[in-house]
Amino acid sequence: MAFDLHYLEERRFMLTIVSADVDDRQLMEHVQSLNERTAGVDDLRELADCRTVTSLEQLSVRGTTLGAAHEVPRLKARLAILVTDSPLLFGLARAYQAFAEHQRGAVEIFQDAQEALSWLSEGRDDLHALRRFVADH
């Protein structure tokens, strides 16, 4: 499975671990699953950790932008996309960001997990809770 979701409901935080080979169909299924699982959560905070993706050969720019465009509008939501230094992964994350920004309040790309969590957190206690949750998964 390319997308593994872990939801910390009381903090409105979704950890999405993206791994292995990713393709257009899997991305669209992930977006649909995320939309259903977090329906009504307008201020969702998501960390999409893409550091263990092994292949992007079947993920197109068109599939990436279509996936982002199918997100449920959540103007208070934030998405942090965590990438490696791969130019291809960064480019696809940037394409997703460009289209998801119309659906979410903010989308940022990071290479450092702690920076991403700090950006997503709502204070010190929240940051510690998010760090613990991510470490457990």
Image (spheres, helix red, strand yellow):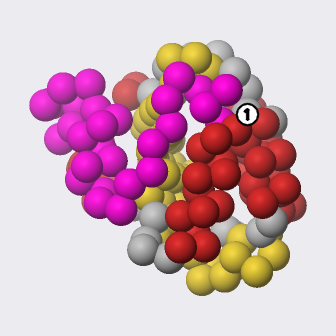
Measuring 43% from the left and 72% from the top, which residue is drawn there? 84
| Residue at point 45%, 43% (across, down) | 108
Residue at which label 1 appears: 71
- From the image, which quarter does the C terminus lie in? bottom left
Image: 74 above or below 54: above
> Going 67% across and 26% down the picture, which residue do you hit?
102
* Residue 83 place in picture, x, y as percent: 46, 64
User: Can residue 25 be seen here?
Assistant: yes
Q: Secondary structure at mark 1?
A: loop
- x 70%, y 76%: residue: 56
> Residue 4's quadrant in the figure?
bottom right
Please name the amino acid that badge 1 sits on: Glu
For the N terminus, the quadrant is bottom right
Q: Nearer the viewer, residue 107 or 127?
A: 107
Q: Is residue 3 located in the magenta-colored stretch of the structure?
A: no
- Return the residue nearer the eye: 13 or 105: 105
Tally of numbered tags = 1
**Range of the magenta residues?**
100-128
Image-based side of 86 in relation to 33, left or right: left
